[in-house]
Image (cartoon, helix red, strand yellow):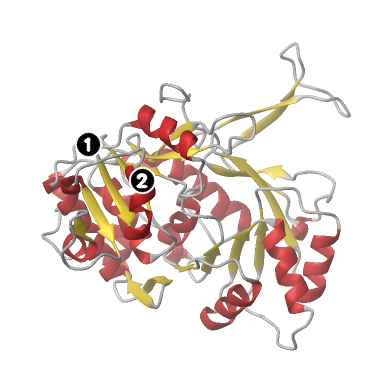
């Protein structure tokens, strides 16, 4: 697939023209080993280092008994360890189960009972909460932020520096599951949508084409690591750009990161952009590197787009997507002159129709249900209770 404005942003696709996340990591490390891939929590990882740590964590998980298709609970903040954990799990053939540490204990317990994770990677501070509903033996846990020796499980440093997994040791296919992408739960208990490598690949291709992203972009995704986590890492991996990771949603911290790392593309909710605009209006310095402000997760209040554009000189770009569509499926691009009253146009590789109650396509000014299809749309909910 020819993606982006520069030939250098293209990856050579493999089986059936699709790439797994592990393919993306390996190809980027081979092509640009010294290019920075991850920035966050006071450290930087090049693509060479990202691949090395990914392979080490994958090898460690296999030695702990991970089999292809097993689910691994991940309870981490948005740090480089989260990115490496996600990629290490899928490289080993596992399925990432991202856990929301802010979830109600009864909801978290119900979800864990349905999913049955066999292993866990967690920050030490979340362990007391986790043990109340998802008890796993220390031999099945990798602990981030623990001392070199911990009774709670294997320290992260041991996992990230051990014997690496060879790519030939496990055969990944684009149709293999990568992670459980949880719905918002706005109409009930959050549902687990099984996102495959192919779903992630096609969603990434669609958004890259729709937003005209390139390999020179530096990405800042403000979504938490348990909500559409592939949005944090898939685009930069596919393009060979860099991802900036922030734990804080403070506008001061965000704008400092944009300035420090020359962030060009940002993905956040309208509330974050509103806070940034209010903060920026009191500052003298600009943030000229930012060229794309992608607004998802909620409808922007009427005043936020205007205030943001006044403060930063670029418009907000509203997007819509869901867990079932593996992320962004519709984009309203101000650069194309699309009306602000609508939600925009379908991204490439998605087909969207409004259907009436009889199953026919709704006409202009008629109320209808949105039907979506395409290779990024996930299969029906696979988990009992979802």
Would residue 355 be visible to someone looking at this image? yes
Q: Against 53, is 106 above or below?
A: above
Q: Residue furthest right?
A: 365
Q: Against 342, is 235 above or below?
A: below
Q: Which mark is residue 50?
A: none
Kindly report the distance in space between the C-alpha atoms of the residues bearing marks 1 and 2: 24 Å
Q: Which mark is residue 68?
A: 1
Q: Position of residue 360 (x, y in %)?
A: 74, 15
Secondary structure of the residue carrying numbered label 2: helix
Q: Residue furthest top?
A: 358
Q: Residue at 80% of width from left, 61% of height from top?
A: 304
Q: Residue at 52% of width from left, 33% of height from top?
A: 377
Tag 1–tag 2 contact (CB < 8 Å):
no
Q: Position of residue 139 (x, y in %)?
A: 15, 47
Q: Residue furthest bottom?
A: 284
Q: Within the image, what quadrant is residue 211 found in?
A: bottom right
Which-is-in-front pick, marks 1 and 2? 2
Q: Within the image, what quadrant is residue 320 found in?
A: top right
- Report crowding for label 1: few under 14, some 14 to 19, many 20 or more residues within 10 A (C-alpha): some
Which of these two is toward me, 51 or 338?
A: 51
Q: Which numbered disc, 1 or 2, marks the residue that appears first in the sequence? A: 1
- Would residue 15 be found to the left or right of residue 211 on screen? left
Q: Within the image, what quadrant is residue 335 found in?
A: bottom right
Q: Position of residue 111 (x, y in %)?
A: 43, 32
Q: Position of residue 240 (x, y in %)?
A: 41, 65
Which of these two is toward me, 69 or 21?
A: 69
- Report crowding for label 2: few under 14, some 14 to 19, many 20 or more residues within 10 A (C-alpha): some
Secondary structure of the residue carrying numbered label 1: loop
Residue ID for mark 2: 130
- Would residue 136 be found to the left or right of residue 109 on screen? left
């Amino acid at each position: 697939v020819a993606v982006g404005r520069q030939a250098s942003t293209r990856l050579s696709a493999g089986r059936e023209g699709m790439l797994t996340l592990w393919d993306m990591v390996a190809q980027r490390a081979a092509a640009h080993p010294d290019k920075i891939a991850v920035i966050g929590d006071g450290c930087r990882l090049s693509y060479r280092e990202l691949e090395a740590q990914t392979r080490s964590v994958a090898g460690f998980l296999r030695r702990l008994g991970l089999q292809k298709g097993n689910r691994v609970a991940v309870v981490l903040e948005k740090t480089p360890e989260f990115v490496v954990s996600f990629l290490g799990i899928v490289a080993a053939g596992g399925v990432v189960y991202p856990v929301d540490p802010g979830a109600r204990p009864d909801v978290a317990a119900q979800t864990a009972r349905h999913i049955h994770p066999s292993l866990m990677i967690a920050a030490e501070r979340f362990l007391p909460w986790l043990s109340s509903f998802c008890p796993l033996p220390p031999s099945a846990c990798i602990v981030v932020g623990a001392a070199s020796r911990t009774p709670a499980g294997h320290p992260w440093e041991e996992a990230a520096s051990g014997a690496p997994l060879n790519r030939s040791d496990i055969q990944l296919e684009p149709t293999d599951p990568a992670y459980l992408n949880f719905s918002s739960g706005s109409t009930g208990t959050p549902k687990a949508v099984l996102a495959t490598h192919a779903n992630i690949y096609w969603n990434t291709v669609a958004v890259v084409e729709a937003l005209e992203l390139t390999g020179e972009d530096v990405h800042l995704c403000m979504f938490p690591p348990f909500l559409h986590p592939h949005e944090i890492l898939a685009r930069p991996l596919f393009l060979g750009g860099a991802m900036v990771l922030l734990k804080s949603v403070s506008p001061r911290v965000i704008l400092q990161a944009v300035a420090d790392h020359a962030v060009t593309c940002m993905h956040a909710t309208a509330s974050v952009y509103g806070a940034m605009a209010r903060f920026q209006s009191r500052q003298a310095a600009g943030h000229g590197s930012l060229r794309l402000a992608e607004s998802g997760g909620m409808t922007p209040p009427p005043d936020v787009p205007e205030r943001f554009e006044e403060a930063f000189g670029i418009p907000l770009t509203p997007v819509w997507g869901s867990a079932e569509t593996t992320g962004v499926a519709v984009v309203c691009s101000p650069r194309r002159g699309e009306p602000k009253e609508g939600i925009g146009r379908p991204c490439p590789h998605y087909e969207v129709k409004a259907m009436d109650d009889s199953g026919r396509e709704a006409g202009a000014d008629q109320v209808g249900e949105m039907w979506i299809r395409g290779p990024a749309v996930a299969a029906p909910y696979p988990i009992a209770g979802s």
